[in-house]
Amino acid sequence: MKDTKDPQARLDALRADTERRNPAQPEFHQAVREVLDSLAPVFAVRPELADPSLGLLERIVEPERQILFRVPWQDDHGRIHVNRGYRVEFNSALGPYKGGLRFHPSVDIGVVKFLGFEQIFKNALTGLGIGGGKGGSDFDPHGKSDAEVMRFCQSFMTELYRHIGEHTDVPAGDIGVGGREIGYLFGQYRRITNRWEAGVLTGKGQGWGGSAIRPEATGYGSVLFAAEMLAVRGLGLSGQTAVVSGSGNVAIYTIEKLQQLGANPVTASDSQGYVVDEKGIDLALLRQIKEVERGRVSEYAARRGPSAKYVAGGSVWDVAADVAFPSATQNELGEEAARTLIRNGVKAVSEGANMPTTPEAVRLFQEAGVAFGPGKAANAGGVAVSALEMAQNASRSAWTPARVEEELAEIMRSIHAVSYETAERYGAPGDYVTGANIAGFERVADAMLVQGLI
Ligand code: NDP
Ligand code: 2IT
């Protein structure tokens, strides 16, 4: 990289270098760019962090370790399939690598690196002593039997086990990985290692080391973050109409917390379409279809009656709302959707998913004065309660749901406060993207600096 003292020129050169060294990884480039674009104000105040001779930035964009492996498995008809397994151990300056596993056909090394990179700063924001990592596979759990999912998980863990551990790397769920998969993965880890090492995975069942409120934590946290952003503007969630995308773990508990706080979530979606329910989403029906039957949101509309309409292939962001919760996947909310939401009067957007809003759409929201909560801050509640699960495992205790929920609320308040105050301090009032990126970066950078050349 060019050895220049001009911070912006250094950042531009680093970005170009990262793109050249990591070809064909557009999601990773996007995630790196979004962080680097926020950092110039830090270097104006703390030039030592950008000192070219330290190479700190070059180290931050390079994972500490990248693991790629073959995952062979047999389907119910005896046929053999081969998938790829990934674990990117990105940064352990603040604690053991921590982050979910994603099973989805779109998973490749660039997707895992984008998620792992985001996770470093998200985890730093929680203040709970966890480093950043992510993993997964291009395996598609849709339409697979429980037995097939179990055989896949066992094969995946038969390689992964040698790389993880409660003090080393602690995976959890993400898209396509929930309680069922964590159960199969944990069983195989225990069998291979002959260790009851509860803290090696989070998102476990509550009867065997899982934490209360972990399934709810990401969605609940994203709603609490939205409530904090609205409170700054003298507004509340009660009585507000909400549009939520996705119908998985994050979306379901986003809808639940919105209803508890008196808001009216009217949508859910999957990769095939969305449903809009003018009476508000019937959560018991949605959960029956998604969690029990593992079905599609189209079935919700078919069973709910005349208040609900299914729109195949449409954009959920066409539905008018006061608050929006993108909770499905990356780049699901682009420029056109942002314009529609702004035209319809949206006041706040809280990212339950990782990087769901494109950079152009983020800019539009910010220019329009919409409160925008980036995923690193807004969806950190899930990994935060994972860290609380690790604490319970280490002390062989189980906290009450009320205690975990109170801690989650306090953590979300503090992430909001540090993002808000950091943005103010660096001359970008109300800009949670800048605030969260700088606050997370400073914690990681400070730890790396005093730990020597790592
Ligand atoms: P789930 O697998 O439970 O649900 C994913 C949902 O998103 C499904 O409705 C799925 O629909 C939809 N979806 C997935 N891929 C696409 C796509 N390419 N296009 C449109 N819709 C899609 O995952 P989670 O709810 O756990 O995760 C959702 C998001 O939240 C992800 O970005 C994840 O990284 C993020 N997140 C999750 C956390 C957690 O604790 N689980 C913590 C923090 C962030 P379909 O079934 O049709 O694929
Ligand atoms: O993106 C995320 O923060 C997660 N999928 C949760 C990670 C975790 O370790 O709980």
Image (cartoon, rainbow, N blue to C red):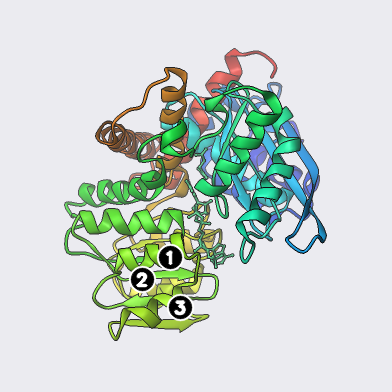
Above or below — where is 236 with respect to 70? below
Element class at badge 1? loop
Q: Position of residue 76 (x, y in %)?
A: 73, 61
- Image quadrant holding the C terminus, namely top right
**Disc 1 beta carbon < 8 A from ligand 1?**
yes
The residue identified by callout 1 is 245
Is the residue marked by circle 2 packed among few (<14), some (14-19), or many (20+) residues within 10 Å? Answer: many
Where residue 411 sits: x, y (%)? Answer: 33, 33
- Give the residue pinned by disc 3: 298
Q: Are marks 2 and 3 in contact (CB under 8 Å)?
A: no
- Residue type, label 1: Ser
Which residue is tagged 2? 267
Identify residue type, mark 2. Thr
Point out the tag, 2 or 3, that comes first from the N-terminus. Answer: 2
Query: Rounded to the nearest whole Å, what is the CA distance between mark 2 and mark 3?
Result: 12 Å
**Does residue 186 appear in the picture of this structure?**
yes
Q: Label 2 CB, ligand 1: below 8 Å?
A: no
Residue at point 46%, 59% (across, down):
248
Res 210 visible: no
In front of the other: 55 or 181 = 181
Left-right relation of 274 to 85: left
> Counting residues from the N terminus, which is met first, the one under dot 1 or under dot 2?
1
